[in-house]
Image (cartoon, rainbow, N blue to C red):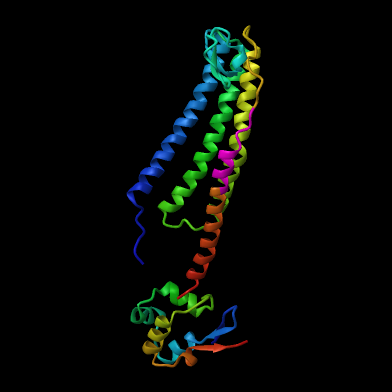
Amino acid sequence: MAEHRPSTPTRVATNLITVLIVLTMLFAAYLVGRALVGAISGGEEVVAHQEVPADRLESLPSSVVVSREVPVTIRIQDADGSQLALATARDLVVVGLGLGLLWLVRGLLLSVRAGDPFTAANVRRLRALALLVMVGFPLVGYVVQLFDGWLASSTSVGELGSTYRLALSGPLIAGLGIFVLSEVFAHGVALREDVEGTV
Amino acid sequence: MTIVSEQGIGVRLDDLLADREMTLTELADRVDLTVVNLSVLKNGRARAIRFSTLAALCAALDCQPGDLLTYEG
């Protein structure tokens, strides 16, 4: 039997994912380090994202109509320990989701590189990816909004917008697509088992 | 010795090899199958056999399919 040679795109993608994982972990370490340094010596700036309702925008002429919330960024200079902790926790939640996704995709790519993608492990990875996308994305988005609200409330500006939205449709459709792919892989595993037993 | 697979198919490869004084490796070379695959068949772990493989085995062992495979129920 001929030895399996992974394609160049597969090798490139696997190496890229590995680099992204390392960079993400370094970024997480940087976030924690920055929070610790800031808590000890002060002077660190953090940001809180808010969406301001149109009726709070007073300086626009009457001919200008703002039909939806306007995204703004509150810059918190010289953040205190609790503000640093909130900002770091908010960012780490996003980093955690990203790391989870990257790790699962890396596992898939490594199996493709080894020439053996139709395995029960990959079916589990794809189902986990589907769940992470369908549930993880909206949940993390909501948690980020919560943290931003708490951060904004800790400033003299206060919380500007109180609308917390769950973005469902995009992650739901993407997650369903990945779940369908996992079922295709499950069928592939069954076919592979049949072929393996054929002489 | 007949090895019976989980589907109830008996494989008499051991007996045929002994009668013809042939080793599994020699047979593998003649039928262009790996020794691993032939072992899978010999030990009753195969789920299916291609007609091309069956024909090659019968030619190499000078036998009929019924000499090589039996149904044990």
In the image, residue A106 above or below residue B9: above
| Residue at 51% from the left image edge and 66% from the top image edge | A191
Pick the front one: A176 or A79: A176
| Residue at 59% from the left image edge and 80% from the top image edge | B7
In the image, residue A129 above or below residue A193: above
Q: Is residue A55 left or right of residue B40?
A: right
**Residue A125 is at least partly visible in this image:** no
Q: Which residues are magenta?
A: A165-176
Instruction: Give percent across and percent down for residue A124.
Output: 57, 51
| Residue at 62% from the left image edge and 39% from the top image edge | A135
| Residue at 36% from the left image edge and 58% from the top image edge | A4
Considering the whole magenta stretch, tell me its main secondary structure.
helix
Of the 4 image quadrants, the one containing the C terminus of chain A is bottom left
Of the 4 image quadrants, the one containing the N terminus of chain A is bottom left
Residue A38 falls in which quadrant of the image? top right
**Residue A30 is at least partly visible in this image:** yes
Residue A106 on the magenta segment: no
Instruction: Give percent across and percent down for residue B72.
Output: 60, 88
In the image, residue B72 above or below residue A184: below
Instruction: Give percent across and percent down for residue B29.
Output: 34, 79
